Image (spheres, grey):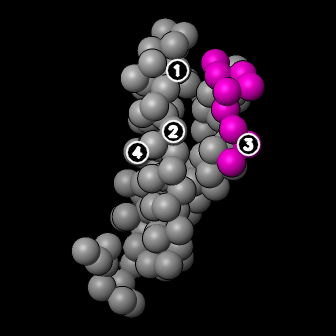
Amino acid sequence: MDLASPGTSASPIVSQIVLAVIAYSDSLTAKRAQVVNQQDHAGAVRLLRDVLRSRLPDAQEKAFRRILRVKDEAQYGARAMLLEEARKLLADLDSFIHFIEGLLLE
């Protein structure tokens, strides 16, 4: 399945990827510590690290940061994001979801 037609803006897709990664992080921190991030999105990474401590692999933290880093650009930016960018972020999201879902089932 294609995410979008070549040449069209992938910003709406990336925006949904950002919202999904935030929702997954919030679901885990809510379950584990009865708290969700109420600050800027950099705070979401800190909160997840605080809740999981050493159980948060560096690769997952980096994927989370990569996705959050494009939030403003995807949702408010003047530049249309490319489909290739969306595909890379979707791969990061898939990995992050797999990790978080495993923890949610514990």
Image coordinates of residue 33 in percent, x first then y, are 54, 10
- Mark nearer the N terminus (2 vs 4): 4
Report how far apart the C-alphas of labels 2 and 4 lie in the structure. 14 Å
Query: Which residue position is annotated with label 3?
Result: 58
- Magenta segment: 51-59
Q: Say whether disc 1 or disc 2 marks the residue closer to the N-terminus.
A: 1
* 10 Å crowding of disc 2: few (<14), some (14-19), many (20+): some
Residue 20 shows which numbered tag? 4
Residue placed under numbered mark 1 in the picture:
29
Going by the numbered disc 2, the residue's amino acid type is Phe
How much space separates mark 1 and mark 2, taking CA atoms?
13 Å
Q: CA distance from mark 3 to mark 1?
A: 17 Å
* Residue 56 on the magenta segment: yes
Decide which of tag 3 and tag 1 comes sooner along the chain: 1
Q: What element does badge 2 sit on? A: helix
Q: Which residue is mark 2?
A: 99
Query: Which residue shows up at 36% across the image and 84% down it?
Result: 8
- Inspect the image, locate mark 1, and give the three-letter code of the amino acid beneath it: Thr
- Percent position (x, y) of residue 17? 43, 54
Measured in 3D between alpha carbons, the distance from the residue under mark 3 to the one under mark 2, in whole angstroms, is 12 Å
Mark 1 secondary-structure assignment: helix
The foreground one among 84 and 55 is 55
Residue toward you, 32 or 36: 32
